[in-house]
Amino acid sequence: MAHNPLAPEWLSPPADANTLADGLWPATAQRAEDGAITIGGVSAPDLAARFGTPLYVVDEADVRTRAADLRTAFDTEFARIGTSVRVYYAAKAFLSTDIARWMVEAGLNIDVCSGGELAVALAAGVEPGRIGFHGNNKSRAEIDQATRVGVGTIIIDSPIEIERVAEAAVRNGVVQNVRLRVNSGVHAHTHEFLATSHEDQKFGVVFEDAPALVAAIRAQPSLAFLGLHCHIGSQIFGVDGFAESASRLLTLHTELLAGGPVPELNLGGGFGIAYTSVDDPTPARRLAAGLADIVAAECASRGIPVPVIAIEPGRVIVGPAGVTLYEVGTTKPVRIGENTRLYVSVDGGMSDNARPALYGAEYSVRLADRVSDAPAALVRVAGKHCESGDIVVNADYLPGDVAPGDLVMVPATGAYCWSLASNYNYLGRPAVVAVLDGGARVIVRGETIEDLLARDAGVSDAAHEATATRSTDNMKETTR
């Protein structure tokens, strides 16, 4: 099949538009004999029939395995250089009580950045000492709550927080462990990174200010300084950016040792995943080995002990283990010159996946309820919102006979899609279903129209009930 000039250069026409590309899908994803995609032993048509669409689906076994494998890889590689690793799951990627429990059972800690995320972690039964609290604008109430419940570490993000955390710790009768977030001047994305003297961003403090701020932290009897923290970006492939950042951090780390102990160094997260067939993320074991070698070499060159290392992966654990299931509503060929793109509109969109609209993120798509030998067609999967930028998949190939009523599935949506979901155009946020060994269960309930109306203070109770009944009846009529 010839390349369609409307397709991006990186997207090649597939030999088979039904194939599930390696590395994009949850570990248990496969085509059943009837052509339907199954995940965790549950078929897409069964999921749609039971839970409706749009629907987030999470492969529980895959999430647990990814978390455990990553922790084992980092434990092994850093034990090789004589230190240990604290692995914090970055809850912003996707958090529910079940997810939090899976992470703890895999040996991970939890990184939160709001009072709401902290509440979810605590509701899941996470030991407070295993929680790290991030954020550039933690409220006084959030800081008070964190110190009161015994959060393990608070990351100081600005000078003003030193006094706020110290006062809260005194008020709650604790000595609070803290890290200081610094900007290393390294910004990384995919396989490239940029190293500068400063970063103009809302997070952290500049290197030059760090020694004075650490001295201020050490001057507070209610604070215990653990070390530095840095985050250099997201969706990072390779270790080069981490190498440059670690070198700069360990220079500062060495300087700080003159004033007292610095037991830890937090290198952050941002490890990338595959969203398309051309993405080539770095495997966890290679990342761990590369980072361990970098830290060992940098510490040896400075003649200092290797500190305890902390990392904060999120996307790399839950992203590949999640998919979103949609139903096709309309298809529309759009001719541009001598070439055609097929628009495939689904029953969700930017309300359940804001990343394409926010970042220009690329995704892939496959028919989920059948296979087809129809010639592949270049498609753009669009949402149902009143926005021209409401695109779920910018470019991929599907069998050209894709039609209304078909189910399609978008892989690699486990991270940030539910977290960024909204009620734009008054669509309810979809449910999240976990699949495992042929079973499926809701781990986050979806929102109904009744749920949305219940927040509107101008709607009477009677109107709530009547509107919800009419809406349910109308939806039943449209599916008959």
Image (tube, helix red, strand yellow):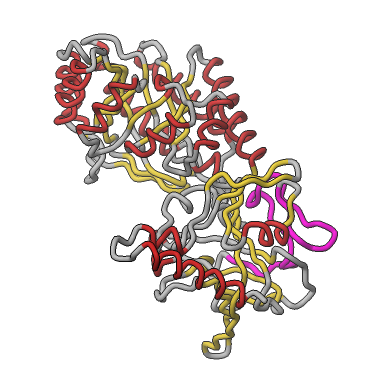
* Vertical arrangement, residue 165 with respect to residue 427, above or below: above
In front here: 34 or 80? 34
Residue 268 spot, x, y in % from top left = 40, 33
Q: What residue is shown at x 52% (from left), y 29% (from top)? A: 290
* Vertical arrangement, residue 441 with respect to residue 265, above or below: below
Magenta region: 11-39
Can I make out residue 358 in this image?
A: yes
Residue 200 spot, x, y in % from top left = 22, 46
User: Is residue 38 a member of the stretch shown in magenta?
Assistant: yes
Quadrant of image for the N terminus:
bottom right
In front here: 362 or 287? 362
Q: What residue is shown at x 66% (from left), y 70% (from top)? A: 13
Total tally of numbered discs in the picture: 0
- Judged from this view, the residue extending furthest toward the front is 462
In front here: 401 or 260? 401
Quadrant of image for the C terminus:
bottom right
Q: What residue is shown at x 39% (from left), y 10% (from top)? A: 305
On the picture, is 115 further left or further right than 87?
Answer: left
Can I make out residue 206 in this image?
A: no
User: Is residue 148 a member of the stretch shown in magenta?
Assistant: no
* Among the 4 quarters of the image, the one containing residue 298: top left
Residue 296 spot, x, y in % from top left = 45, 19
| Main secondary-structure element of the magenta-colored stretch | loop
